[in-house]
Amino acid sequence: MSIDTLLKPVPVTILTGFLGAGKTTLLNRILHADHGLKVAVLVNDFGSINIDTQLVVGVEGETISLANGCICCTIRGDLLKTALLLLDRAEPPEYLIIEASGVSDPWAVAETFDIPELRSFFRLDSVITVVDAEYVRQQQYYEDLIIHQISAADVVVLSKVDLVTEEQRADVEQWVRQIVPRARILPAIHGDVPMSLILGVGRYNLEVQPRIVVPRHDHEHDHHHDHEHGPHCDHDHGDGDQQHDHHHDHSAEFSTWSYVRDRPFSLKKLRTALQDLPATIFRGKGVLYLAETPQRRAILQIVGVRITVTVGEPWGDANPSTQMVFIGAPGGLDGASLTAAFDACLTDAPGQEQIAGQQSWFRRVFGGG
């Protein structure tokens, strides 16, 4: 089958949410669920290394990386081109999921698939925003962006509800409900939600989404996200050029720093280095090469104050190496100091101690966004 003989539009789900909210965890749940669909995935990560693509486990050939840019602005053309190429395969997907980066504006991605030229190829089914129940109300500096991500949703997955009290959960749900009164809110632990409530849920309609004016804060920054969306949105949705001017410069709002080495870490030394990360870093993730488990990759996740290292799949044919990405406040990443700290954790000696399959630690200093 080719794009010219496509029988019906392919449904598209946009998966969005702020940095560390749990998007990839939910995506892995979807891909391994028993829904019977041939699913293709486009993963957009903010930074030069697409860690999220490597964290999508057990799915070969249908996960495509869109790295080193943001699909709501700088690589939006790549998104369209890649999506159309998927349809031109001998066996095109029956469903398309787009995991946007944690700094993306999902309104722009949704509008991309709403242009008339694409409606015969794609049908926007839903926008799922993942909200971190533990940390979402602590991200005041980026609250404008988070509200925009939530306001685009017709489904909100409230993640990590096991890490908060019932009172905190109710407070977050009420706050989300104020932003998207019509959205379905699904509480989740480790991305475990009923597939019937998030896939094939209907036809997403940009025109009935809430009209949101993002509240401003007295922080000395400007996200330029103060435009309105909804039935009275003044963007032109009707032409192929999609002149949606976001005005945002992610490099002015976030700093990123990457680290790659092919020598293993000593886990004991690495733990100390991670716990002593500067407060200006609020997100980190990566694939680790550890001396203690040289045959298997380990997965690093840092969200807020929490650090988790999980022993994962064997390296297989891949050469073992460490790849890490850190995201923080503008100007808040000292690459030379970070390089020195992590290089000091490298070792050529085999690890002697047995380690647990998952370890969790707390950072000693955290700025909280």
Image (spheres, rainbow, N blue to C red):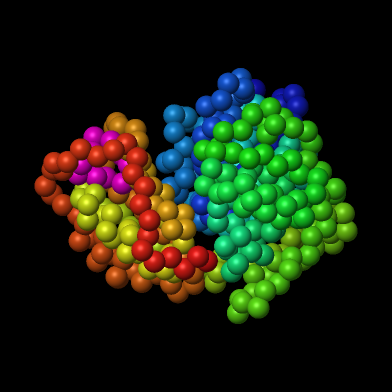
Count the marks: how many? Answer: 0
Q: Which residues are magenta?
A: 287-298
Can you say which quadrant of the picture contains the N terminus? top right
Q: Going by the picture, which residue comes out furthest to the right?
A: 232
| Percent x, y of residue 363 | 37, 60
Quick one: 326 or 107, which is closer to the camera? 326
Q: Is residue 173 left or right of residue 355?
A: right
Residue 187, quarter of picture? top right
Measuring 56% from the left and 41% from the top, which residue is drawn there? 42
Quick one: 298 or 45, which is closer to the camera? 298
| Percent x, y of residue 63 | 51, 36
| Percent x, y of residue 163 | 52, 47
Quick one: 130 or 318, which is closer to the camera? 130
12 versus 283 height, above or below? above
| Percent x, y of residue 16 | 62, 48
Q: Is residue 82 magenta?
A: no
Measuring 71% from the left and 26% from the top, which residue is drawn there? 6
User: Does residue 324 appear in this view?
Assistant: yes
User: Does residue 17 appear in this view?
Assistant: no
Q: Is residue 159 left or right of residue 149?
A: left
126 versus 74 height, above or below? above
Quick one: 5 or 168, which is closer to the camera? 168
Measuring 85% from the left and 49% from the top, which residue is drawn there? 207
Q: Going by the picture, which residue comes out furthest to the left?
A: 349
Residue 95, quarter of picture? top right
Q: Is residue 304 left or right of residue 259?
A: right
Residue 245, quarter of picture? bottom right
Measuring 44% from the left and 29% from the top, which residue is drawn there? 58
Q: Is residue 110 left or right of residue 317?
A: right
